[in-house]
């Protein structure tokens, strides 16, 4: 049932309250929810719970929803992104009942008498309006998964170092059934048990090769954090990546979800140019894109622009050079922050320093003269926002700029 006009006004009137107390509300919400529903710890990222990232991300999402309650179209990209992540974690409709109960309870707990029956009713209606949208969207995603509706066991059949920081894991389904083809750029969730933790831990990793029926490949950066000695503590950002690098071996079993994600290259007969812009491990979904384009003999002009800390941290260095050298329509440009004395300018790298799109030719490098050129950006958050800002300033329409948002929540600004 849609919100009444009075309920919309009430929800919007709580925006200033959320600006002040939203983070407290969501912190209480998660604390109470996970205290009473320990099975949900199999879903939520323990690291992000411990360091507070999860509650802050939810506070931002709740604030954005209240601020745009009368213009939900502005939230469509964020909702779509969240639904894909939920589907990769197999969130079920019944779990929305639990979340709604504890979210309203947290509002009551923090706001006290200010959370009147009228305000509670308005927020209950607002919550279920959004929950219904998401449940329906996630149900559609499950239907698209070729009957893959729960975690599947996969065996690690190959483990290949790609750089000092990044290792590829080749995963085959234990049941031997053919895998559904995904869209280049999408990700899977991986669920594993970590020694010392009671519950499963889930993480999302981009698929880093062209779609195949027999295996999936993920390429994982070992996140050393501020102190690699603490990599086994639950608050360490690299808890799972360190476990994968250090402990998961060929022959081991991990659980995998059906591929999801709204950051992908449409597999069409388009002739428009493609510009891939990446930094660090952000190159992984773009590897899937370029391998797909070249394996299908696409003649679209392709320019990969990559920023790396050094040649030692640059994954797939030889692969990218080989693709560029063997396909007339593919070019690669590397910005190397710390080139070595024996790195060859023009071959091993093209510019010293950080990514600077102003150094590139607007026509031959960025294809700005073609109003159908597509741009795909993946890397650290500030890297992506800076690259997107430059492209917008150069006149690129936002609809042609695709940005992958990793991390807690993955909610783009609205």
Image: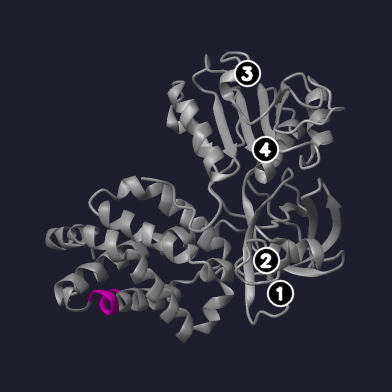
Q: Where's residue 397, x and y in %? A: 43, 27
Instruction: Tell me the quadrant of the picture where the C terminus can be found.
Output: top left
Q: Earlier in the sequence, mark 3 or mark 1?
A: 1
Q: Relative to residue 31, is residue 190 drawn left or right?
A: right
Q: Residue furthest left?
A: 6
SS for callout 4: helix
- Label 4, label 3: how far apart the Cα atoms are: 18 Å
- Label 4, label 2: how far apart the Cα atoms are: 28 Å
**Color style of the picture:** one colour
Q: Where's residue 15, x and y in %? A: 24, 58
| Residue 181 visible, this angle | yes
Circle nearer the viewer, 4 or 3: 3
Q: Relative to residue 220, is residue 371 drawn left or right?
A: left
Q: Quick check: 264 above or below 114?
A: above
Q: Earlier in the sequence, mark 4 or mark 3?
A: 4
Which residue was labeled with disc 3? 365
Q: Which of marks 4 and 2 is nearer the N terminus?
A: 2
Q: Nearer the viewer, residue 306 or 81?
A: 306
Q: Earlier in the sequence, mark 3 or mark 2?
A: 2
| Residue at the spot 51% in from the left edge and 58% down from the top edge | 408
Q: Which of marks 1 and 2 is nearer the N terminus?
A: 1
Residue 289, labelled with which disc? 4
Q: Nearer the viewer, residue 227 or 223?
A: 227
Which residue was labeled with disc 2? 239
Which residue was labeled with disc 1? 194
């Amino acid at each position: 049932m849609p919100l009444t006009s009075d309920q919309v006004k009430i929800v919007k009137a709580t925006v200033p309250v959320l600006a002040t107390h939203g983070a407290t509300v969501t912190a209480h919400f998660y604390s109470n929810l996970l205290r009473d529903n320990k099975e949900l710890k199999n879903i939520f990222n323990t690291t992000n719970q411990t360091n507070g990232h999860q509650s802050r991300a939810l506070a931002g999402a709740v604030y954005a929803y209240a601020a745009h309650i009368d213009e939900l179209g502005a939230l469509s990209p964020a909702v779509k992104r969240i639904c894909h992540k939920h589907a990769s974690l197999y969130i079920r409709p019944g779990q929305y009942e639990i979340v709604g109960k504890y979210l309203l309870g947290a509002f009551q707990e923090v706001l006290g008498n200010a959370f009147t029956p009228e305000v509670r009713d308005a927020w209950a209606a607002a919550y279920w309006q959004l929950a219904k949208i998401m449940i329906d969207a996630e149900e559609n995603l499950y239907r698209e998964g070729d009957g893959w509706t729960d975690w599947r066991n996969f065996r690690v059949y190959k483990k290949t170092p790609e750089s000092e920081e990044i290792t590829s894991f080749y995963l085959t389904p234990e049941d031997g059934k053919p895998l559904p083809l995904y869209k280049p750029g999408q990700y899977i969730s991986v669920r594993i048990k970590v020694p010392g933790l009671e519950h499963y831990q889930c993480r999302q990793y981009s698929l880093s090769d062209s779609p195949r029926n027999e295996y999936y490949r993920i390429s994982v950066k070992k996140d050393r954090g501020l102190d690699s000695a603490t990599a086994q503590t639950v608050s360490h950002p690299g808890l799972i990546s360190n476990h994968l690098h250090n402990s998961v071996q060929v022959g081991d079993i991990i659980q995998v979800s059906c591929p999801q994600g709204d950051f992908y290259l449409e597999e069409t007969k388009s002739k428009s140019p493609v510009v891939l812009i990446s930094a660090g491990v952000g190159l992984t979904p773009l590897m899937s894109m370029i391998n797909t384009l070249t394996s299908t003999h696409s003649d679209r002009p392709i320019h990969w622009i990559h920023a790396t800390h050094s040649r030692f941290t640059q994954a797939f260095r030889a692969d990218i050079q080989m693709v560029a050298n063997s396909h007339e329509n593919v070019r690669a440009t590397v910005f190397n922050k710390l080139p070595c004395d024996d790195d060859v300018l023009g071959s091993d790298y093209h510019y010293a320093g950080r990514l600077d799109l102003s150094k590139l030719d607007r026509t031959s490098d960025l294809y700005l003269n073609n109003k159908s050129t597509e741009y795909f950006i993946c890397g650290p958050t500030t890297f992506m926002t800076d690259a997107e800002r430059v492209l917008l300033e150069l006149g690129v329409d936002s609809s042609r700029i695709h940005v992958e948002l990793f991390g807690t929540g993955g909610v783009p600004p609205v």
